[in-house]
Image (cartoon, helix red, strand yellow):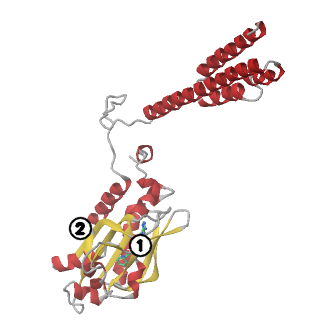
Amino acid sequence: MGRSDASRNDDIEAAVGDALGQIAGASTLEDLRAVSAGLTGKKGRLARLKAALGGIADIEERKTLGMLVNEALATVTGAVAARENELVRTSLAARVAAERIDVTEIAVGAAGSERRGRLHLVTQATERLEDVFIGLGFRIAEGPEVESDFYNFEALNMPPSHPARSMWDTLFVETDPPGSVVLRTHTSPVQIRVMQEWPPPIYAVMPGRVFRRDTPDATHMPVFHQIEGLVIDRGITFADLAGTIEAFTKAFFGSDFTSRLRPSYFPFTEPSAEFDIRRPDGSWIELGGCGMVHPHVLQAGGLDPDEWSGFAFGFGIDRMAKERHGVADLREMYSNDIRFLGQFP
Ligand code: FA5
């Protein structure tokens, strides 16, 4: 190897040394990408050394130096990859540390007060609804989430194959015979259970979780909550239903809200209506269904329709919570993001 070879050799070593220094100095992935492009790109020092090899007349010399340049390039590429790994790992660790939630933490506030957890928005709304209805003279009842076809449909005036069953996209539990057990699609089956268990007069609300094959969107969830209402007494009329809904609207949403009933259809009430509330800005939103309890439903509950009459309603609790707190999208309430949930004391 002549003198010029030795100096070329030194050049390669110097270029590698310099490259390794730059790689180690890159403190972010963006830095590293820029450094790496400069080192291994066509205009990089090693690329220029490689291009200069063409001018060496001695084939053996060219070969040896060519190998050295290629090795140098491989060393640089390997160092870039190793540094990239390192930076990804540290940035991930930093993110995990920043977003870490210590579930055992009890933070002490400035005044020494304990920071405490909060009830979920839907739990808060359910408790408020219960308070409002207890204030109006109602009692609370509950029923099972896994329900028989009888209570979810048949006793509600929907015999097998009744077309109105398709109003609810039902999730079935695998049973023999198939279709005899469902995840309840609404809280209305609790009406029947209450009628069968409690002697009239009945003034009851039944909150709970319900299930449908609905695709999640801003106003729909496949698992959501309803509150059912049932009033059974002598001489109950549609005016009692409208009055109760208006009283409830003002008590729950505030005196600047008002309600309206629109004709609708449910197999278990006749007549039936949809219940909307009017926001202070004049816009309307649908919250649930209601109506006078159908005579067949009273009979399924063991009551004589000639003696007793009543009304029922079923509201979506999640939509009420969404409305009360101005949440844009129902899905946010189930994202389990503590920063979202923490906004509602
Ligand atoms: C019913 O479920 C009837 N059982 C209501 C009823 C009870 C009528 C008693 C008459 C007498 P509907 O399918 O419309 O009706 O649901 C009632 C309310 O539940 C809706 O107005 C809406 O507020 C809410 N809701 C329905 N589907 C969803 C969903 N996928 N996600 C969130 N809320 C929903």
Residue pictured at 41% horizontal, 81% vertical = 166
The answer to which of 40 and 296 lies nearer the viewer is 40
Between residue 172 and residue 255, name the one nearer to us.
Answer: 172
Asked whether mark 2 and ligand 1 are closer than 8 Å, the reply comes as: no
**Of pointers 1 and 2, the one earlier in the residue sequence:** 2
Q: Secondary structure at mark 1?
A: strand
Secondary element type, mark 2: loop
**Residue at horizontal 79 percent and vertical 24 percent from the top:** 51
- Identified at 38% across, 78% down, the residue is 290
- Ligand 1's quadrant is bottom left
Which disc is residue 131 wearing? none
Determine which quarter of the picture holds residue 240.
bottom left
Please name the residue shown 60% across and 30% down the image. 29
In this rendering, would 124 be left or right of 325? left
* Image quarter hosting the N terminus: top right
Above or below residue 97? Residue 164 is below
Look at the image and tell me whether residue 115 can be seen.
yes
> Is the distance from the Cβ of mark 1 to the nearest ligand 1 atom less than 8 Å?
yes
Few, some or many residues within 10 Å of mark 2 (<14, 14–19, 20+): some
Report, in whole angstroms, how far the alpha carbon at label 1 lies from the one at label 2: 19 Å
Residue 288, numbered label:
1
Give residue 198's position: percent from left, percent from top.
16, 76
Residue 157 point in image, percent of width and height: 31, 87
Labelled pair 1, 2 in contact (Cβ < 8 Å): no
Is residue 181 or residue 76 the one in the foreground?
A: 76
Q: Is residue 67 above or below residue 148?
A: above
Residue 39, horizontal then vertical, whole percent: 70, 25
| Above/below status of 39 relative to 339 | above
* Residue 308 appears in the picture as rendered: no
Residue to which mark 2 is pinned: 142
